[in-house]
Image (cartoon, rainbow, N blue to C red):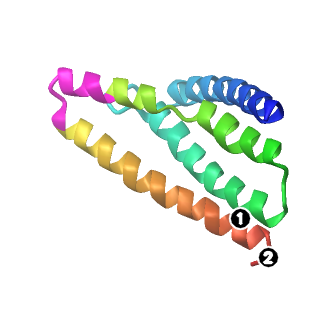
Amino acid sequence: MLKIWIAVFLGGGFGSLLRYGAQTLLQGNVSPSLFPYATFGVNIIGSFLIGLFSVLSARFGWSEETRFFLTTGLCGGFTTFSTFSHEGMNLLKNGNYGIFFFYLVSSLLIGIATAFAGNRTGLWFAGK
């Protein structure tokens, strides 16, 4: 059990560092706008990865530590529901209701679709 806790801890740290780097990169390459592209981007990428890692870990029998490192740790640290919520709240507070609604719906629908795409990609990789 301790090994899983350590795996989640390490994965979360790496995921948070990757999120910071990805958000910095995305913010530097996207024209300023009200839409939170950086958070949207990391959450969509993370959704794909968790779908992919879930299938690959089951197919190839990865250890529990590896599975938790990649899914709960890395993907959990990389994606950010709290920032999504904070940015959504700010959109509402500033009266940007249309952008908020688009952000909410697109994050949910595209996030689930990319998790499914990651799952299907994992199945393809695994030869199923």
Residue 33: tell me if it is visible.
no
Which residue is farthest front? 1
Q: In which quadrant is the C terminus drawn?
A: bottom right
Q: Look at label 2 and name its amino acid.
A: Gly
Please give the range of residues in magenta. 88-97
Mark 1 crowdedness (10 Å alpha carbons): few <14, some 14-19, many ≥20: many
Residue 39: give x, y in percent of width and height: 47, 32
Residue 58: give x, y in percent of width and height: 76, 62
Q: Is 100 above or below relative to 105?
A: above
Q: In which quadrant is the N terminus drawn?
A: top right
User: Does 50 appear in magenta?
Assistant: no
* Most common secondary structure along the magenta stretch: helix
| Residue name at image x 77 percent, y 68 percent | 125
Which residue is farthest bottom? 128
Q: Which residue is mark 1?
A: 122
Q: Is residue 81 left or right of residue 86?
A: right
Asked if marks 2 and 1 touch (Cβ < 8 Å), the reply is: no
Q: Which residue is mark 2?
A: 127
Label 2 sits on a secondary structure element that is loop
Q: Is residue 24 left or right of residue 65?
A: left
Q: Look at label 1 and name its amino acid.
A: Gly
Q: Is residue 23 left or right of residue 92?
A: right
Nearer to the camera, 45 or 28: 45
